[in-house]
């Protein structure tokens, strides 16, 4: 075994959106970070429809806003649904939530090979030592603590790397997640199978909705229709387990048969042809994706992104959950590495906040799969699961845009300003806390945040650590 000799602060396995984000957020705090990725980028991945919380929130923190802007990705203003008891398609704009309203009320539809490459290159620029074609095999454990990993390098040689913390960001197929204890719990409710391919020449919705994701319910499940360029479209059927027969046999034929069963999608694709060569030439199948791990961490190791959990492609929450978990976990790593708080307290905070966001999407999605309701009823469910009182589609869009956590940094600038003003207003007369909020506002770096529970932590002023809440420590 060859060992690299040094001890990294953080070692990240996997270079998808979760891995490259957590690695960059740790490196930006001056920590020594190693990232090992099994493939050579660019590589294919599914998960192309993004949310504003990722595009403007996380990507803004990562410093890739301009790069994303000039990458030529399709702008997604919202979603169009043929869903529920309404027989007509209905649309929503991200601008309908005050959390996203303003000049940044959009996301992107991305070719993941390009998007993931952009994030991984950014991690490199931020000081992360990135090594591709390095497959992590297992973790090194000693005395109840993970202390590094064993991996195979591009020449096939077995190596080890040591680190104070190991982060598993190897996604859905993770072999490392089992080391944190507990297990993956698969959902009894979401047991769908996806069959998907790519088409040239599919129709576009009229402006300004031409970049929207379209989701269309049909007897066996639903279709996604994602415009990736003026001419390229990602088309996938998400089929209920009981209809699994329709996904067997020749995949291209199965996909054609499903499309024929869904008049709206058949119409959109009437003048299109399926791509049959290159990265998009294959019809692919994915299943067993709805799960959540019992535990998120153990001493010296944490799980982020799909390695921890995923719910369902409907509402495109995957990359949002992956990158948001990366931010939450990075705060825990940065705080524990600086020695401000113990790792138990730090990772408990990560887990509590992730679970809250996961639960909101999960509970909403369970209700949304009941296709006997109309939009107004879905909006009501969103108000209920998020406890957001916004009228009309407001709470629904706040949730499906990735803003349920109410983390200021994931929302638009105008919403942040408004919240700051509200807080200052409230703080008049509230002595202790008011002092802190006013100070934050004076420095202009304010990240207003309230703890999730009485002993919960709050976000530090730099946004990249946790700290004790002034109110809870004063009690
Ligand atoms: P990944 O993107 O899977 O990245 C993991 C990385 O780890 C990969 O690069 C892999 O090569 C690497 N790796 C694996 N094993 C090892 C190893 N042993 N050593 C080193 N590296 C390793 N999300 C959306 O946001 N929008 C959507 O529209 C959407 N649609 C979806 C449709 C379907 C059918 C499915 C199943 C998912 C969809 N998702 C969507 C979810 C999305 O694909 C994931 O949530 C997202 O890719 C998770 O990012 P990640 O970084 O955790 O993992």
Image (tube, grey):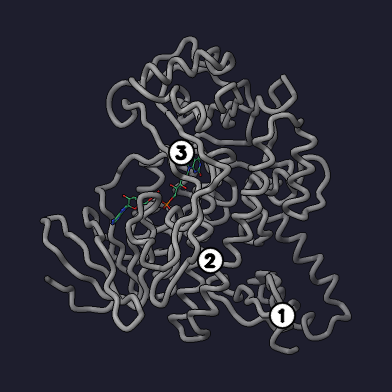
Alpha-carbon distance for marks 2 and 1?
24 Å
Would you place residue 408 above or below residue 379 in this image? below
Task: Looking at the picture, tell me which residue is in the foreground, 3 or 422.
Answer: 3
Residue 184 placement (x, y as % from top left):
45, 56
- Please tell me whether mark 3 or mark 1 is closer to you in this view: 3
Residue 137 placement (x, y as % from top left):
24, 61
Q: Residue at x 56, y 17 (%)?
A: 262
Residue 285 placement (x, y as % from top left):
38, 32
Judging by the rendered image, the residue that carries numbered circle 3 is: 110
Would you place residue 263 above or below residue 241 in this image? above
Task: Looking at the picture, tell me which residue is in the foreground, 126 or 51.
Answer: 51
Task: Tell whether 465 sits left or right of 135.
Answer: right
Task: Looking at the picture, tell me which residue is in the foreground, 282 or 120.
Answer: 282
Q: Are there few (<14), some (14-19), or many (20+) residues within 10 Å of tag 3?
A: many
Judging by the rendered image, the residue that carries numbered circle 2 is: 328
- Whether residue 28 is visible, yes or no, is yes
Alpha-carbon distance for marks 2 and 3?
24 Å
- Earlier along the polypeptide chain: callout 3 or callout 1? 3
- Earlier along the polypeptide chain: callout 2 or callout 3? 3
- Earlier along the polypeptide chain: callout 2 or callout 1? 2
Residue 277 placement (x, y as % from top left):
28, 23
What label does residue 439 carry, if any? 1
- Quadrant, the C terminus: bottom right
Q: Residue furthest bottom?
A: 474
Give the secondary structure at mark 1.
Answer: helix
Give the secondary structure at mark 3.
Answer: loop
């Amino acid at each position: 075994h060859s060992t690299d000799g040094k001890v990294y602060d953080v070692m990240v396995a996997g270079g998808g959106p979760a891995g490259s984000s957590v690695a960059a957020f740790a490196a930006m705090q001056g920590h020594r970070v190693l990232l090992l990725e099994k493939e050579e980028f660019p590589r294919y991945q599914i998960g192309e429809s993004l949310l504003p919380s990722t595009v403007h929130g996380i990507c803004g923190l990562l410093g890739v806003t301009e790069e994303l802007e000039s990458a030529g990705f399709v702008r997604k203003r919202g979603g169009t649904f043929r869903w529920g008891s309404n027989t007509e398609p209905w649309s929503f704009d991200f601008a309908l939530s005050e959390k996203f309203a303003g000049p940044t009320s959009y996301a992107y539809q991305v070719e993941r090979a390009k998007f993931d490459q952009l994030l991984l290159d950014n991690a490199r620029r931020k000081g992360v030592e990135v090594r591709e074609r390095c497959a992590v095999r297992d973790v090194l454990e000693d005395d109840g603590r993970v202390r590094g990993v064993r991996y195979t390098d591009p020449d096939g040689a077995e190596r080890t790397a040591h680190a104070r913390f190991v982060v598993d960001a190897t996604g859905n197929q993770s072999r490392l997640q089992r080391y944190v204890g507990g297990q993956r719990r698969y959902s009894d409710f979401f047991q769908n199978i996806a069959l998907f391919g790519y088409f040239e020449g599919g129709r576009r919705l009229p402006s300004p909705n031409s970049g929207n994701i379209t989701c269309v319910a049909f007897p066996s499940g639903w279709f996604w229709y994602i415009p990736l360029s003026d001419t390229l479209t990602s088309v996938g059927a998400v089929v209920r387990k009981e209809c699994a027969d329709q996904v067997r046999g020749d995949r291209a034929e199965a996909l054609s048969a499903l499309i024929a069963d869904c008049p709206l999608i058949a119409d959109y694709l009437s003048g299109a042809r399926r791509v049959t060569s290159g990265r998009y030439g294959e019809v692919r199948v994915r299943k067993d994706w709805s799960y959540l791990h019992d535990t998120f961490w153990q001493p010296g190791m944490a799980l982020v992104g799909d390695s921890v959990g995923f719910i369902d492609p409907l509402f495109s929450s995957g990359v949002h959950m992956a990158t948001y978990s990366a931010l939450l976990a990075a705060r825990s790593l940065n705080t524990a590495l600086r020695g401000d708080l113990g790792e138990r307290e730090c990772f408990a905070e990560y887990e509590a906040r992730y679970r809250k966001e996961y639960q909101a999407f999960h509970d909403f999605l369970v209700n949304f799969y009941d296709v006997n309701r109309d939009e107004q009823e879905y909006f009501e469910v969103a108000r209920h699961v998020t406890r957001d009182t916004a009228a009309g589609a407001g709470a629904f869009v706040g949730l499906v845009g990735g803003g349920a956590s109410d983390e200021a940094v994931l929302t638009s600038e105008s919403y942040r300003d408004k919240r700051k003003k509200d807080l200052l207003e409230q703080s008049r007369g509230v002595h202790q806390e008011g002092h802190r909020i006013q100070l934050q506002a004076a420095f202009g770096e304010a990240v207003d945040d309230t703890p999730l529970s009485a002993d919960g932590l709050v976000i530090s002023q730099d946004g990249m650590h946790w700290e004790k809440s002034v109110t809870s420590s004063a009690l």
